[in-house]
Amino acid sequence: MSLQFALEGVVIGLAVGSIYALIALGFALLYKSTKILNLAHGELVLFGGYLAIALTRSLPLPLLLAFLLAIIGTLAAAALLGFAIERTIMRPLFGQPALSVIIVTLALGYIVRGVMVGVWGGDTRQFPPVLPADVIHLGSLTMPRVGLVSALVALALLVLFSLFFRYSLWGIAMRAAANEQLTASTLGVSLTRVFAYAWAFAAIAGSVGGILLGLWLGVNFALNFVGLKALAAVILGGLDSIPGAILGGLILGVVENVIGGYIDANVRFPGFSLYGFKEITPFLVILIVLMIRPYGLFGTEHVERL
Amino acid sequence: MSVRPAGDFKTSYARDMALLDIRFHRAGFGLLLLVLGLAPLLLGRYLFLLNAIGIFAVGAIGVSLLTGFAGQISLGHAAFMAVGAYTSWLATTRFGLPFLVALPLSGVAAFVVGAVVGLPSLRIKGLYLAIATLAFQFITEYVIIHTVGGSGGNVVPAPRVGGLQIRGETQFYFLLLPVWLIGGIFAANLIRGRVGLALMAVRDRDYAAQVLGINLLYYKVLAFALAAFYAGIAGSLFAHYNRVISSEHFSIITSIDYIAMIVIGGLTSLWGPHLGAAFVILLSQVLKIVTPAVVALVPAFGKAATSVREIAFGAMLIGLLIWEPGGLAMLLRKFKRYLDLWPFTY
């Protein structure tokens, strides 16, 4: 592995990883406050990407203005979707066993993806050229401009989210509910409202991830796979840890691009090749983490009592 | 407890312990066997539906044992099915073994793989286990594509039993039916016995079960291995029925279909997997027929047609989990209870 290859992998990996981190943040946020493992998170990513592209294309305005309006519209729609999911599907299932909730999120993913594909078809859709498609040189390394922009946006959002949780009343209420649901509830925190906000934030984080990935690679219905990569990131960081999700996303991006990319390009066996190894690196990461340290890097270790 | 038919008593311990305890149930099961036996005559060219239902019902019995009775979530059941299917393919094409050897062999191969996949279930549970099985699903798909399968399909020969070449739906049906029945009855007996009770104890509270002297590792691994065994048998049957197998047949979508089957059918019911498999297969088939007809009427509907199945499945799962978590089996039981006292329900 040449140094150049490794460095380039790290840079690209950090850029992609920052998007994973953002998506994983939505995941961890939701798990932390509601204890729901949202297997439909990839579909929320899909939702953001598709809707933003459709809005950007359909608004009869100058491109940049249309793009900005589209983003605002998409985020509002994502928040609404989050509220709607909580109200119609999750509230009746409050307190149900984990299996039911997992299956419901799977089914929800089916519905969201089905509607997306039904409305926009199965082809890859691209944003109109909002950002210049050139490459930025960092010393001897190159990187698409889109990558840099998305890394910066993801970083800004991560800071924004952490400030929200640190200082705003609702952020504090959500942390309280995450810490100990019943106690928070007796102290006047409305759990239903906390859950609704958690879903809305998860949908927003996912949608922004979808928009950024859409700017970079375009959107098609296979993008929901990214939700599973974000799952790997949160497992690595610890399901209920927000810093863990961010770090997990970055590590996953780097691992995928450096190790996965290396194996993809260089490892050959007689008889069969390992192309596409990059795509299953996240799952190997999941398995390894679950074997060695199931609660992840920063997650709280679950102690069970009889 | 539903009301029993009047005058139909259990008069001996043997009757009390029997799987079909009273005359009413025996007669009902006999009728069911008769209908199943005559199905090729009754269904005619629609027999392929029953074949598909049977294959998936065998697989779904496994999921129901694992998820419904042992409480372990698996999102990778299609991967076990793939293990069975490819074992059967290897056995019949590379090693030239007869089908009747390949069928149990693929079950055993899946059994072993299932035990290995089940090993971590002692350490990780609930959500984490679901994620691990999901990872196993994707890794299996990857392995199939990169080793045996490639991106194309593998051709499996038609099964031969003795000197008889199995061709066509009717012959395959009579090959499938005994496997299906034995699978169902075996599961029913298993659930009543020590193993089934232990599995349910593990489901309800695994540490409490351990305190009561149940070996957690043994029973969790056993649950996985048994579920995988059923899936392996289903995989082998599927391979020889479809005659072509590729990684696409055993994707995550099939795994989710299995989950859908047992949830729709009823998680903790012996009839659940059969009802669920029938419902899912029939629904897919109906949508396959209805959707093009609707598109022909309303061309604007064309784009949406591809995803109608997904949306319908999703909506059905959510609706059932919210309103009737017991599934079709519970609905049937409620209906029966309603009929017991009808029309004087007070």
Image: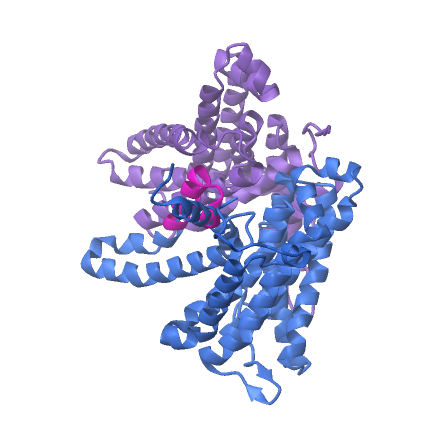
Chain colours: A purple, B blue
The residue under the point 38% across, 57% down is B283
Please, is residue B212 above or below residue B157 in the view? Answer: above
Main SS, magenta residues: helix
Please, is residue B115 above or below residue A233 in the view? Answer: below
Which residue of the protein is positioned furthest toward the left in this rendering?
A: B297
Give, as a single range, the part of the protein colored magenta.
B311-329
Q: Position of residue B316 (x, y in %)?
A: 40, 46
Q: Position of residue B152 (x, y in %)?
A: 52, 70
Residue B12 in view of the camera: yes
| Quarter of the picture holding the C terminus of chain A | top right
Between B28 and A64, which is closer to the camera in this rendering?
Answer: B28
Between A190 and A28, which is closer to the camera in this rendering?
Answer: A190
Residue B138 in view of the camera: no
The residue under the point 60% across, 55% down is B10
Residue A81 occupies quadrant: top left
Between B12 and B263, which is closer to the camera in this rendering?
Answer: B12
Q: Is residue B317 magenta?
A: yes
Which residue of the protein is positioned furthest toward the front in this rendering?
A: B7
Q: Is residue B21 magenta?
A: no
Q: Position of residue B45 (x, y in %)?
A: 37, 76
Residue B178 occupies quadrant: bottom right
Determine whether, in the image, residue A304 is placed left or right of residue B171.
right
